[in-house]
Image: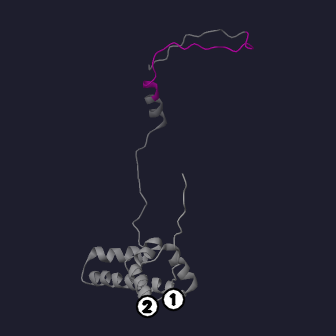
Amino acid sequence: MHFMFKSIPFAPRKVEATEARLQAIYDAAALGLKGDSLALAAGMLPSEFRQLCELDPVAEMAMLKGRADSEMEASSHLRNAARAGDAKAALAILQHAHGWTARQEISVDITNRISITQALQQAQERVIDGLITEQQPEYLEHAPATKHISTAAQ
């Protein structure tokens, strides 16, 4: 079998910051797209978009301007809603623009007091009658081997 390689014509795309391309970048950024998604929506490969931003700062400015204009528009709608009496809109502004957060502290106040004698009495009530066997170490020669201890509440 004989394989033949076919030549694939390749012409590198010239990426320029044309008015149409800058508008596409602006529009994609205004929609909230970022990175590779922004590049593809603007009709470019992600590598082309990165290259364009490095070679022509106007491309990055179009992206920044699109984001800023979109944020300003949404922010003004939220502000108008808050001024019209929308409490949720006002709270969203306070939380996101001014850093308001809900309190995260919990206060627990317990005034239940117990006396030591009452605690000992309750502990004695929980003791079970039983047989306790102690094992003695070899160096204690004079101690008995086992003890029978009965503990009960009296």
- The residue that label 1 is drawn on is 58
- The residue that label 2 is drawn on is 19
x then y, percent, for residue 146: 61, 9
The first of marks 2 and 1 along the sequence is 2
Q: Crowdedness of circle 2 by 10 Å Cα count: few (<14), some, many (20+)?
A: few
Report helix, strand or loop for mark 1.
helix
Name the quadrant containing residue 39. bottom left
Q: Amino acid at mark 1?
A: Val
Q: Crowdedness of circle 1 by 10 Å Cα count: few (<14), some, many (20+)?
A: some
Q: Is residue 23 above or below residue 39?
A: below
Residue appearing at x 43%, y 82% in the figure: 25
Report helix, strand or loop for mark 2.
helix
Question: Depth check: 115 or 98 in front?
Answer: 98
Residue 135 forms part of the magenta stretch: yes
Q: Amino acid at mark 2?
A: Glu
x then y, percent, for residue 45: 48, 74
Is residue 2 in sight in this rendering? Answer: yes
Residue appearing at x 52%, y 70% in the figure: 8
Q: Nearer the viewer, mark 2 or mark 1?
A: 2
Question: Depth check: 101 or 39 in front?
Answer: 39
Residue 104 is left or right of residue 76, and the answer is right
Is residue 33 in sight in this rendering? Answer: no
Question: Depth check: 107 or 44 in front?
Answer: 44
Question: Depth check: 75 or 90 in front?
Answer: 75
**Quadrant location, the C terminus:** top left
Magenta residues, start to end? 123-141
Quick one: which residue is furthest to the right in this view? 139
